């Protein structure tokens, strides 16, 4: 009995299916890595924006105090 051609022909769809599953797993792992890095970068950006807002609010308060003291001196 010669199973060479029939076995090879039946093995091809299994290899294609295995390659497809490996590709899907690769895509999922890549996506999870990307999302992890993206979340870290988003958190850093949010921290920087919070610091910037704090500095801008502090400068606005300082400017208002300077204007108030200048108005007090004029009177």
Image (spheres, rainbow, N blue to C red):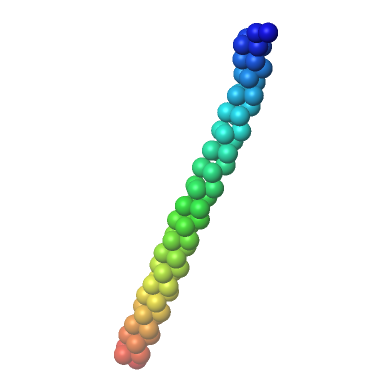
Q: Quadrant of the N terminus?
A: top right
Which residue is at the front of the view, 14 or 48?
14
The picture places residue 53, in percent across and down from the top left corner, at 44, 69
**Residue 6 quadrant:** top right
The picture places residue 65, in percent across and down from the top left corner, at 37, 84
Query: In the displayed structure, would residue 3 be above or below residue 68?
Result: above
58 lies left or right of 21: left
Which residue is at the front of the view, 48 or 11?
11
- View extreme (front): residue: 1
Q: Quadrant of the C terminus?
A: bottom left
Residue at 44%, 65% in the rendered image: 47
Query: In the displayed structure, would residue 51 be above or below residue 66?
Result: above
53 lies left or right of 27: left
Residue 60 visible in the picture: no
Residue at 41%, 64% in the rendered image: 48
Query: In the displayed structure, would residue 72 be above or below residue 24?
Result: below
65 lies left or right of 25: left
Which residue is at the front of the view, 74 or 24?
24
Residue at 34%, 87% in the rendered image: 69
**Residue 26 quadrant:** top right
Q: How many marks?
A: 0
Residue at 56%, 33% in the rendered image: 23
């Amino acid at each position: 009995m010669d199973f060479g051609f029939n076995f090879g022909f039946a093995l091809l769809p299994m290899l294609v299916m295995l390659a497809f599953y490996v590709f899907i797993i690769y895509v999922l792992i890549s996506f999870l890595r990307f999302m992890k890095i993206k979340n870290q970068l988003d958190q850093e950006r949010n921290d920087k924006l919070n610091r910037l807002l704090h500095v801008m609010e502090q400068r606005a308060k300082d400017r208002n105090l300077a204007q108030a003291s200048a108005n007090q001196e004029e009177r």
